[in-house]
Amino acid sequence: MIEWSKVFAEALPYERFLDGYATPSQRNRWDAMHARYALTDDQRTLLAGFSRKMPVLCLCGAWCGDCINQCPVFDHFAQASSVIDLRFLDRNARPDVRGELSINGGHRVPVVVFLSEDGYEVFRYGERTLSAYRRMASDYLGPSCPTGFVPPPAETLNAIAADWLDEFERAQLILRLSPRLRAMHGD
């Protein structure tokens, strides 16, 4: 069984992850995508209202087009919320974690594990959002691996951000409504 607190402690904050794993070319693509994401006032308000500490572990690869297209918005979420502690782990750094988080028999990324403040897994979500899959299905039906070289259009980024924010909110509500955590915090 994975001890998520230990894995989380080994993982890196956004900038340090990119400094350690991204090539200059990959870093340019991550930075360009980060600049394309902009949260709405409503999204910032929602994130600022989160009150339960929420460690968030993202298994990803600096080389991965899906990660380039999605993970930068997580940094925006973390910047807008004082309780989101966001960390990144390279897919190949921990084979045990990579195996635990495989999807449909494959080592897909990004995969996000939402944790409670005391290290319990709340839930995991990953690889692509429903909006991303809908876009892929409309563009082409069949296997594909986005490169991160051609970024998705703005409306797709907005939909991806909204899909991921729904999952972050879901985790926060699970944490806020947890009888165990409510008893621990007296709320």
Image: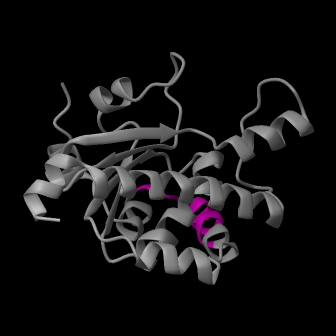
38 left or right of 11 in image = right
Residue 16 x, y percent position in the rendering = 35, 67
Q: Report which quarter residue 137 is drawn in.
A: top right
- Asked if 52 appears above or below 147 in the picture, the reply is below
Where's residue 99, x and y in %? 36, 23
Q: How many labels does the image show?
A: 0
* Magenta segment includes 43: no
Q: Residue drawn 77% across and 25% down?
A: 143
The residue at 51%/16% (across/down) is 105
**Residue 49, placed above or below residue 104:** below
Image quarter (top left, top right, bottom left or bottom right) of the N terminus = top left
In reply to whether residue 24 is colored magenta, the answer given is yes
Residue farthest right in this picture: 139
Depth check: give the residue in front, 173 or 164.
Answer: 173
Viewer-proximal residue, 91 or 123?
123
Question: What is the magenta range?
Answer: 21-31
Q: Where is residue 61 in the image (x, y as percent from the top left)?
A: 49, 46
Q: Tell me: 68 left or right of 95.
A: right
Query: In the picture, residue 82 is in which quadrant?
Result: bottom left
Percent x, y of residue 128: 63, 41
Residue visible at 75% across and 55% down?
149
Q: Is the magenta stretch mostly helix, strand or loop?
A: helix
Left or right: 6, with 155 as reference point: left
Tell whether 140 sits left or right of 12: right
